[in-house]
Image (cartoon, rainbow, N blue to C red):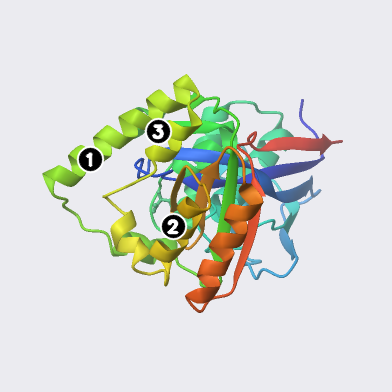
Amino acid sequence: MACDKVVVSSPATIANFGPGFDSFGLCLESPRDRISMRRLPNDKLEVKVIGKHKLPRDPLRNTASYAAIKLSELCGCERIGFSMTIRKGMKPGSGLGSSAASSTGGALAMAALLGMRKKELILEAAAMGEELVAGSRHFDNVSAALYGGFTVVSDLSTRTVIKIRPPLFQVVVVVPDISIETKKARGILPQQVPMEHAVRNIGLASGMLHAMLKRNVRQIGACLDDKLALPYRAALIPGYERVRNAALSAGAYGVSLGGSGPAIFAITGGNASKIRRSMAEAVGEAGLKSESFVTVPGKGARVESRS
Ligand code: HSE
């Protein structure tokens, strides 16, 4: 049913999740963006951003409002005026899918105003919002943000997304106080990779899917490695290896980079506070401040209220 006002929440996500470059995504229960949107009686567009993070107010440059506009276009609607207020739950440029959270939330909010429920269209519009910021239409973050749980973009050309309910584990996240633009972090990746690296990733990615389906958290951790993007991007993060070793020594099952970084995450079945402390200390030893938190795999973007 269409409505005039809606509030949605949209989660942080971990793209790539080890070996699944541009394919795997894990949805986190928190943090989440909150987006409220109401129809305006005219075709005016307004964007307000609450909180400490600076984001564009121009509706055609803000990823959330842009995705909302794209969704209405995909639905064949005339321009719809709206006022949107965004409260960011995560820092942009941190590797936690900030732009995907915004764009998925914006597209979902517009879908709710229109009374439209087709997830494929919401996903497409969200990916357009992602493209505005990242310069490429990758679907890993937006798929996880929309569907929740663990997602695999198994065929981009047909937009085939596999959804898997992950087992329960804790995700420890440390975000060093540097910002890495996704566009730049994609720009440094080689266009060709050695065959042995491709083979290693195929093995790890297959092992990851098996571990998810068997709900084997230790094996999930063991498959958290990558040869396609991680080696190049880790070099942008002072102390990455030190943080990784600190997490593993404190009992983490596996460690990797959140999307294009700088967020570093570890997964574990227990001991999360100790792992978090060790990782934060290691970032400090590398000369950087950080924010850190512990969360769990979560549900996707959702409508919190509508009227
Ligand atoms: N898969 C994308 C990348 C995610 O690694 O560039 C960016 O957040």
User: Mark 1 or mark 3, which is nearer the start of the sequence?
Assistant: 3
Q: Nearer the viewer, residue 42 or 139?
A: 139
On the image, the x and y values in percent for residue 169 come to 59, 36
Discs 2/3, front = 2
Mark number displayed over residue 153:
3
Of circles 3 and 1, which is in front? 1
Q: Which label's residue is closer to the chain start, 2 or 3?
A: 3
The local crowd at label 1, few if under 14, some if 14 to 19, many if 20 or more residues have their Cα within 10 Å, is some
Would you say 111 lies left or right of 194 here? right
Q: Amino acid at mark 1?
A: Arg
Q: Label 3 neighbourhood size at 10 Å, few (<14), some (14-19), many (20+)?
A: many
Q: Who's the residue at 48% across and 59% down the image?
A: 246
Discs 2, 3 touching: Cβ within 8 Å: no
Q: Which residue matches tag 2?
A: 244
Circle 2 sits in a helix, a strand or a loop, which is it?
A: helix
Q: Report the disc number at residue 42.
A: none
Q: Amino acid at mark 3?
A: Val
In the rendering, at what x and y percent does residue 70 appear?
Answer: 55, 45
- The Cα atoms of the two marked residues, 1 and 2, are separated by 20 Å
Q: Does the closest atom of ligand 1 sit within 8 Å of the Cβ of label 2? A: no
Residue corresponding to mark 1: 200
Residue 44 found in image quarter: bottom right
The local crowd at label 2, few if under 14, some if 14 to 19, many if 20 or more residues have their Cα within 10 Å, is many
Disc 2/disc 3 C-alpha distance (Å) = 27 Å
Farthest residue to the left: give it.
195
Left or right of 76, for residue 37: right
